[in-house]
Image (cartoon, rainbow, N blue to C red):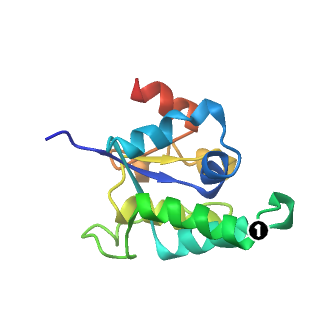
């Protein structure tokens, strides 16, 4: 059996995939559908995605928002905070407190990657507390490492 890569996709990456259909990232939904990637989420991360989908600048009506959210949630594995044995392991503190939940999710879900374009998260990529736990990478780097 082939093991799937366990990935946390932050809200900006989700928007690129499900709202903007960024062609540079088109392979990600294909790999998810093929079972090669297992997206990981949490109730907090889903709630943020739902809230952001409602921003007026995206001009998504309620049905489009619900369809996008259901599509993503249906492909992702929802992890409850603290469910893993290592959920108490320390993490670096992100400058943006709203992004800490993605670090916690990656830790608690034993993710292989946290895929983000957020600079506050990317600056933590080389922290010793994360060594041998999960990689924080841009979508572009993630795609290049998947090849």
Of the pair 58 and 107, the residue shown nearer to us? 58
Counting labels gives 1
Of the pair 124 and 26, the residue shown nearer to us? 26
Q: Residue visible at 38% across and 61% down?
A: 107
In the rendered image, which quarter contains the N terminus? top left
- The answer to whether 84 appears left or right of 120 in the picture is left
Q: Residue 119, can we see it? A: yes
Residue 137 image offset from top left, x and y in percent: 53, 39
Task: Tell me if mark 1 has few (under 14), some (14-19) or many (20+) residues whose alpha carbon lies within 10 angstroms of its own.
Answer: few
Asked where in the image residue 123 lies, by quadrant, the reply is top right
Q: Residue 97, can we see it? A: no
- The answer to whether 33 appears left or right of 16 in the picture is left
Residue at disc 1, secondary structure:
loop
Q: Is residue 54 above or below residue 57?
A: below
Q: Is residue 145 above or below residue 22?
A: above
Residue 57 image offset from top left, x and y in percent: 86, 60
Residue 66 image offset from top left, x and y in percent: 62, 70
Of the pair 18 and 79, the residue shown nearer to us? 18
- The answer to whether 119 appears left or right of 36 in the picture is right
* Residue named by callout 1: 61
Asked where in the image residue 49 lies, by quadrant, the reply is bottom right
Q: Residue visible at 38% across and 76% down?
A: 80
Residue 106 image offset from top left, x and y in percent: 42, 58
Asked where in the image residue 59 lies, by quadrant, the reply is bottom right
Q: Residue visible at 55% across and 68% down?
A: 45
In the rendered image, which quarter contains the C terminus? top left
């Amino acid at each position: 059996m082939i093991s799937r890569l366990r990935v946390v996709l932050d809200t900006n990456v989700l928007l690129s995939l499900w709202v903007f259909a960024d062609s540079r990232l088109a392979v990600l939904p294909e790999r998810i559908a093929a079972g090669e990637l297992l997206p990981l989420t949490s109730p907090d991360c889903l709630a943020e995605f739902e809230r952001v989908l409602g921003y007026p600048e995206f001009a998504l009506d309620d049905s489009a928002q619900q369809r996008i959210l259901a599509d993503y949630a249906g492909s992702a594995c929802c992890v409850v905070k603290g469910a893993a044995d290592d959920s108490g392991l320390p993490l670096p503190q992100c400058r943006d407190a709203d992004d800490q939940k993605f670090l916690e999710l990656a830790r608690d879900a034993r993710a292989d990657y946290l895929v983000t374009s957020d600079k506050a998260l990317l600056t933590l990529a080389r922290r010793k507390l994360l060594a041998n736990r999960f990689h924080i990478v841009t979508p572009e780097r993630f795609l290049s490492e998947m090849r």
